[in-house]
Image (cartoon, grey):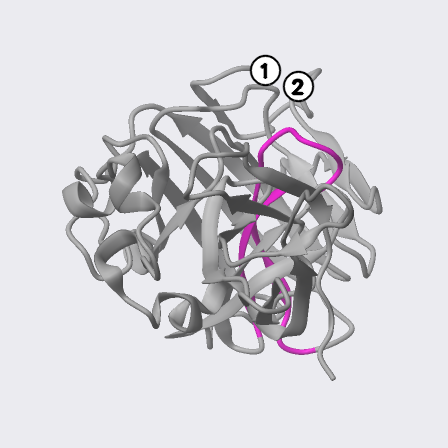
Amino acid sequence: MAYPFDETFASGIPAGFGSVGGAGGITATWNGTAQAVDLVFSQAQNFWKLTAAEFSSDFWCEVDVEILAAPYTPPHFGFWLWDGVGTYEGYRIATYANLWIHANWTSSGTQYDWADTTTPTPWAIVGARKTLRLDARKSAEGDWWDLRVSLDGAPAVQLLKRYYTAFLPCLFGFGLTLRLHRAAGGTPSALAEPTPVMRRALLPTVGRRILVPEHAAALRFHHRGLRPLAGTRNHYYHGNHRITGTVKEKGPQTDLPVSRRVLLLDERANFVVRETWSDAATGAYAFDYLNPDIQYLVIAYDHQQQFRAAVADNLTAEPMP
């Protein structure tokens, strides 16, 4: 089943229309009387893939769902935008504890960047039937998604998200039973062109600028606007863990500690998280208050241009003392 589609399940579930994703705890049964699909979700991170087509450009997806049963209140369900990598990797936006919440997920099922919004969801109760629509539009730069969820035609929550190149829209549920009366989707999105994204409080043209080597290696240089506090403000990577190391220069008898510019990157996103300079006397450096769920990459540059950069990849932050 590919886009566009508009399925009312009048005569069953079309072949290839839906498939089980995530933890795999879903039972999908056609209800002939209601002309709908009854989806029973186990208490795990499960989602029902609505199509077999991932989208790397603008799209929309709409579901008419009824909450049949839930052993807890309020019910927890919504959209899962799977990027096709691993079992879970992608973005989830759902109702939880009477609020819209959103989070990123790694391919193996680790949640990060979890956050709630100020948009309440008092309608999320057993017996409620609502039409949820997701509109997704990619920025002109190609690295940001503008996402909006509407409830019965009225905008409910709108967010910007980065990292992902393509999405497969899925219906997410946790430990409840949903009746899917209709599912539809197509292109393009109803959203307007996203507002240009501010990168660390700088204009996009400044945030993306390429610095000449002598400036980039200048002593005590802080990239992207010479702002010493850039690292401490980055809430995406904040936590109570750290990465430490030393920078040394090869000598005739023994390696000598040196002061060099050291960058910490998100290995998956190629995004600079922090930067510092190693200590001249010991060669030691430290990146504190890091999120332990991210894989990091450290690069040490020789601004004297006598040696190539030293790289350490696949690093995981350790608990801080």
Q: Which residues are magenta?
A: 73-96
Q: Is residue 84 magenta?
A: yes
Residue 169 image position (x, y, % from top left) = 54, 35
**SS type, badge 2:** loop
Residue plotted at (32% across, 59% down): 222
Q: Is residue 48 visible?
A: yes
Q: Residues within 10 Å of mark 2 (few under 14, many from 20)?
A: few
Q: Is residue 182 magenta?
A: no
Residue plotted at (56% across, 45% down): 299
Residue plotted at (53% across, 15% down): 2
User: In the rendered view, would you say 228 is above or below 135?
Assistant: below
- Seen from the viewer's position, the closer of residues 274 and 78 is 274
Mark 2, residue position = 14
Asked whether disc 2 touches disc 1, contact meaning CB atoms under 8 Å apart, the reply is: yes
**SS type, badge 1:** loop
User: In the image, what residue type sits under mark 2?
Assistant: Pro
Residue 129 image position (x, y, % from top left) = 51, 58
Determine the CA span between mark 2 and mark 1: 8 Å
Q: Quick one: which residue is furthest to the bottom in this view?
A: 321
Is the N terminus in the top left, top right, bottom left or bottom right quadrant?
top right
Q: Is residue 34 visible?
A: no
- Seen from the viewer's position, the closer of residues 250 and 138 is 250
**Mark count:** 2
Circle nearer the N terminus (2, 1): 1
Mark 1, residue position = 1
Residue 259 image position (x, y, % from top left) = 51, 59
Residue plotted at (54% across, 32% down): 308
Q: Quick one: which residue is furthest to the front in this view?
A: 252
